[in-house]
Image (spheres, grey):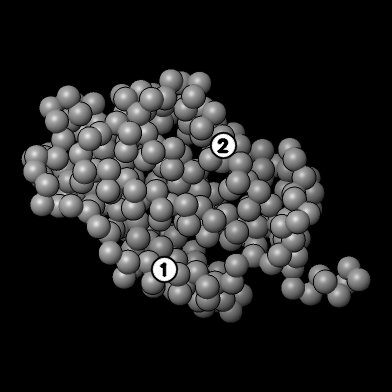
Amino acid sequence: MSSPAPHAALPPTPSAYWLTFFRTNADTPDRIPWADRPTLSPAEGAAVIASVLEFQLGESSEGRHLRDAADRYALATGDAAYASAIRLFIREEQRHAAYLARLLAAEGVPLKGRTWADSVFRKLRHLSGLETAICVLLTAETIAQVYCAALRRATGSRVLRAICRRVLADEAVHVRFQAERVAILRRGRAAPALLVSIALQRLLFAAALVVVWLNHRSVLRRGKFNALGFWRAGWNSFEPAAEWMDPRRYVWEGDVGAAA
Ligand SMILES: [Fe+2]
Ligand SMILES: [Fe+2]
């Protein structure tokens, strides 16, 4: 693993910034041309609908476990802005789910109640506290960036392409928001324990890439990925997040004087 870049020695972004960002982003127009009909061609529909149904399900969580974990964290640390930011983050995910649900409704496709992959993902998120929940979410969000880019290439639908564009923009911010919090939670962790956390995260990511390829390859192939290309794009998406997750890349308040 490469060591953290010395030029990036800044503190993590404060929660107050994220709170302001999510408030502003919620008011940013989505510019999705909903009046366009029909949305998907029959060939596109056959290739993408089953996959989009599962993606929609993944985006539609109520986020109760995450919200409770963030509340406990805020209480313990006094970082109340983080608990508020998490609520707005959950609302953004629900907005993504609503976009996809609206598209599927326009196609006359009923939403899915549950799939095995979604159930496993939810169980993993609920295994433990805030750090585990965020790490599992980060896995999904870094892969979602690759998936959405492929989905956008896979369709000529202006509606679906606009949805992908907005989701991609939001997810890029989510990844940084979540990854920096992981670094905050891992601050001061001893090197061996930190290495175990990083190895587990990479293992989970590799497994998730395989599952996503198997479950969504019709979209991914249509979006110009073969298995190897998807694997590489996945890790390219993961690496910046891995660096933001690393507490050793930041300067921490109180450390400056101590280091001098
Ligand atoms: Fe999302
Ligand atoms: Fe997200």
Q: Is residue 124 above or below residue 75?
A: above
Q: N-terminal of the two: label 1 or label 2?
A: 1
Q: Determine contact: label 1, label 2, CB under 8 Å.
A: no
Q: Is residue 79 left or right of residue 102?
A: right
Q: Which residue is mark 1?
A: 22
Q: Is residue 162 left or right of residue 214?
A: left
Where in the figure is residue 179, as x and y percent of width and height? 57, 54
Residue in the picture at 28% in, 48% down: 163
For the residue labelled by badge 1, is the local secondary structure a helix, a strand or a loop? helix
Residue in the picture at 51% in, 34% down: 234
Mark 2 neighbour density, 10 Å: few (under 14) some (14–19) many (20 or more): some
Task: Name the quadrant containing residue 187.
Answer: bottom right
**Most foreground residue, 64 or 28:** 28
The amino acid pointed to by label 1 is: Phe
For the residue labelled by badge 2, is the local secondary structure a helix, a strand or a loop? helix
Residue in the picture at 9% in, 39% down: 38
> Can the viewer see residue 68 in this picture?
no
Mark 1 neighbour density, 10 Å: few (under 14) some (14–19) many (20 or more): many
Task: Name the quadrant containing residue 86.
Answer: bottom left
Q: Which residue is mark 2?
A: 236
